[in-house]
Amino acid sequence: MILHSLGDRRLTGYTTWGCLWEKGSCTKETEYQLKNRQKDNLPMQSRITAWWPDGSVKWTAHTADAALLGKEIEVVPGPPSQVKQKIQVLKKDGFMEILAGSMKVKIACDGMKLIDSIYFHEKKLLINGRTVLLLEEPSVWNGNSVKIKKEYDSRITQLSVEEEGALQVIIKYTGYHESAVGDQKIPFVIRMKVGFDSPRIDFIHTFLYDGDEEKDFLKGIGIRFQSPLEGKIYNRHVKFMGDHGVFHESMAQLLSWRPKVSQEIYEKQIRGERLELTGSDKETVDTVLKDMPFWSEYDLCQDSANHFCIKKKIKDENCCYLDCLHGKRTEGAAALGSEHGSVLFSIRDFWEKYPSGYTFRNLDGDMAETVMWLWSPGAEAMDFRHYANRGYNQVYYEGYDYKGATPYGIACTSECSVMLSEEMIPKDQELAEFAESVKRPVQYLGTPEYYHERKAFGYWSLPQQNTQMECWLEDQLDMAVDFYRNEVDQRNWYGLFNYGDFMHTYDRERHQWRYDMGGYAWDNTELVPTLWLWYAFMRTGREDIFVLAEKLSRHASEVDVYHMGRYKGLGSRHNVRHWGCPCKEARIAMAAHHRFYYYLTGDRRMEDIFEELKDNEITFLNKDPLGDFYDKEKMVYPAHARTGPDWSSLCANWLTEWERFDNKKYRDKILTGIRDIKKAPLKLISGPDFEFNPADAHLRYIGERASGGTHLQICMGAPEVWMELSDLIEDEEWKRMLADYGRFYYLPRQQQMEESDGIIGSREFSLPFMAAAMGAYGAWYLEDQVLAERTWRYLLHASISQGNHDGFKILTVSNQGNQKNLKEIPWISTNFTAQWCLNVIVVLEFIRSYLPKTLKEGDELVETMPEETFHKA
């Protein structure tokens, strides 16, 4: 497999990527060889991440040092490079030691610390790494509103070596935070990556919220380290990245009135040069030091997407902070150092996932303390409460009238890194390059053509622009992505719990998204924008689309989903608060959203997510998806599942578990449901509401009801999951069922009634453009030209009508939305955009040859479809 580095990212640091293999080409015993353009055999660490149904290897993940690789690499079966030196993991005397060339990490197995000490070139530069948590409780004291700050320390309950190879070791910590009085809150899962001979250590920090939303506001969370300091106070420095350039100060700046320090000495100090003073220069500086402040503490807080502040103070607790610098957006790298050496810190997506920050303390002592804040206490505490004490079902599209918001069990994952240096303080360029490498890590990927040929993630099309209509469709797909990419920044869709998600529906009158209107606010994967963006990336290889999809996957897999508690494995439908909707459903959490990210990058956190989902059907016993629509006393099975989106989402989970471990138990769950659907009068066309038994995965046909509408069966990713499954299970009857479904959806109403003998009753096949992928599959499978043309009519009619070819054209209005020139699409909704774009991408793969060649021809095609033939939505 030939791969290339994504975008123009700097080739530095260890990186992990995925490789897809032809069915039957690799086995469990296969070894893998890494080559650069010069065909050198380079060191690489490998693992298997997925299997084909025949037991051969499907996906692998590989790790190597990007600095050795170059822009293009090749992975082939073959004997790997022989590594002369490799990482060693030793366990003795209650400690774990990681010997990684120039780096040595020592971990105490006492359950208190993430790291005991880290040595670089045999010099101890970091000690006592541990988690830190601050909760804030609103209260009343003597009639006054007060805020109680509660401090917690780390308590590690499980320490494991998740990956141990020659080049990289991953340590996994599982635990919780504990107060001095034994109160236990906010579990965490932290991964630490150590690379051979690398000065850098990476952390993936996940925390889960298990607090009382009424009193456990998040005031601060992060990782704390201590750093030994040595030498003169004027040889101690801090650096922080700003909007432009680097903020740099010494703890004792040698700029004085009387006696006057030589300007040359001060210039050297500001350049970060080590001062070795002698004679009269030393006497002058020593005199000055007796009568000047020593800056002991610095704090950086990015409190919004558009503001950060750096402040400092002396050690005296009764003295105030001084503002050093205010700015807009910092990429967030920081460093402190002394004659002993320096430590660089960087938090990924620093300003995008505000409020982040750093606190450096005791810089004038022997042991400095650094806290990398993933939520900085310099900002307002996070209030997890809902915006109302009820739901607004019909008016605000919230599912039910009762309040269903609970944050208990949601999670959030952040990434941060530290880098060690023997230099007193790194150069500004080194700090900037470190920040860039953390924010935009090296990622190797194959070409769209390679993935397409091997049907990675099922059926999707490559771009072609051979006709006017093809060019128009590709323009629309590009315009849709570009609009949402720019909208993230225009609307400031940022913040630790928001970044990655989009809003649901636009309000053209307010020139604002409906952020305050229940189910019209945050989208939460509604109508699978995840699949739209990932398939858009797969077919184009565009870095900007990869970033959008990556951030959405990270957010949606954590914040929109419950990882513990009564709703574990379920997600919350779209709402003003990500966890606000009373509807808790499997479709929001399903593995299909994130398989792309996992197999392309080997991301270990996604393995936790998939583990949570593998037996997700058990949650249906506690939260029946249709529990409010049926009388429980009349049920035969204990729960319900619509064939889509409930059962289809379970299929995605089972498929992922089946392929990750070649565990046929999960394949059999899928096959059980398919056999049951085959028994229904109309098979897959039958009413999607089924009774469901989570214990054995059986479905029971109960009639032609379609709670929520028939379109829900196929607009939440079911077509893409089912089509990919069809090739894996090799069941021709199942393929025919998919084809028949697409054919039937587009039949005129009278013909539907005749063919079904009236069984479908009043059930409507609504929002037909959302069924285009199924219609296209049917036309392709059945070789049905009429169906192909009918499918294009429905899909094109949804976007072009009455001679309007504007599609996703952006309009500009002045002085609206707090913008001098606001760029908007007044009719936009993420539901429509995600579904229309996704269907176009899939439909082009099956029936491109039936697409009209020109826009005029497309108009004519639309006009041949009278409005009354469209089923009412």
Image (cartoon, rainbow, N blue to C red):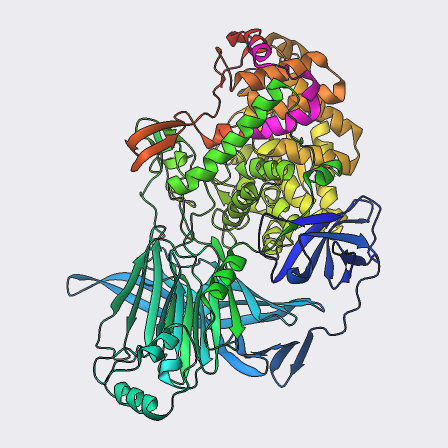
Q: Is residue 242 visible?
A: yes
Residue 288 vs residue 259, the one in the foreground: 259
Q: What span is colored magenta in the figure?
A: 837-859
In this view, 656 is above or below 347: above
Q: Residue at horizontal 49%, vertical 74%?
A: 129
Horizontally, residue 819 falls left or right of residue 630, namely left
Q: Residue at horizontal 60%, vertical 14%?
A: 854
Residue 155 vs residue 412, the one in the foreground: 412
- Residue 667: x and y in percent read 74, 43
- Residue 206: x and y in percent read 51, 60
> Does the magenta run of residues contain 839?
yes
In this view, 207 is above or below 123: above
Q: Is residue 705 visible?
A: no
- Residue 678: x and y in percent read 73, 28
Q: How many marks?
A: 0
Q: Residue at horizontal 58%, vertical 13%?
A: 858
Residue 568 vs residue 446, the one in the foreground: 446
Horizontally, residue 181 falls left or right of residue 113, namely left
- Residue 327: x and y in percent read 32, 56
> Does the magenta run of residues contain 38?
no
Q: Residue at horizontal 56%, vertical 46%?
A: 619
Residue 776 vs residue 682, the one in the foreground: 776
For the stretch drawn in magenta, the main secondary structure is helix
Residue furthest to the left in view is 143
